[in-house]
Amino acid sequence: MLIKFESKDGANFVMLQDTATALLRMMGTNGATEGAVSEEQLSIAIEKLQSALALEQKKPEQQPAEDENDDDEEEEEAPVAISARAQPLLEMLQQAKVQNSFVMWRPE
């Protein structure tokens, strides 16, 4: 399922539910697939998200286990870091804060 993030002050975007839920929990919400961050809550949500992302960056990278039977020379793409996936949401939250607005999300 996709989660759509909306704000009247920026471009809307969608995100896969598992990533969206993780980021919403980092912001201090319960991770529900529908909700909003009000103007009054934006500063706290931004601070919590930035703190959680900073902690994530300090964690050692997990290397996938090598398959001894895998003779392929193909290189697998590195997973996209949660901090990179968080950028559109973080920018939307910051823009909403500047505009004294809010951010909503719902299933798409």
Image (cartoon, rainbow, N blue to C red):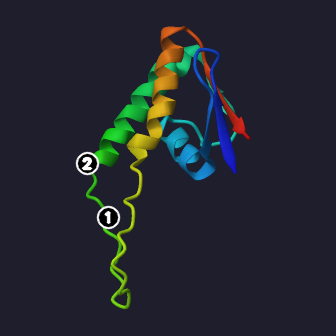
Image quadrant of residue 74? bottom left
Q: How many numbered badges does the structure rendering display? A: 2
The numbered mark at residue 53 is none
Q: In the displayed image of the protein, which residue is found farthest to the right?
A: 108
Depth check: 43 or 101 in front? 101
Name the spot of residue 13 as percent of width and height, x first. 61, 33
Front tag of 1 and 2 = 1
- Apparent side of residue 59 relative to residue 98 in the rendered image (left or right): left
Q: Nearer the viewer, residue 32 or 106?
A: 106
Percent position (x, y) of residue 100?
Answer: 55, 8
Q: Which dot marks residue 62?
A: 1
Q: 38 left or right of 43?
A: right
Mark 1–mark 2 distance (CA, rounded to whole Å) = 12 Å
Under tag 1, what secondary structure?
loop
Name the element at disc 2.
Answer: helix
What residue is shown at x 34% (from left), y 47% (from top)? 56
The residue carrying mark 2 is 58
Residue at 40% over, 41% down: 84
Q: Residue at x 33, y 80 (%)?
A: 66
Q: State the image quarter where residue 48 is shown.
A: top left
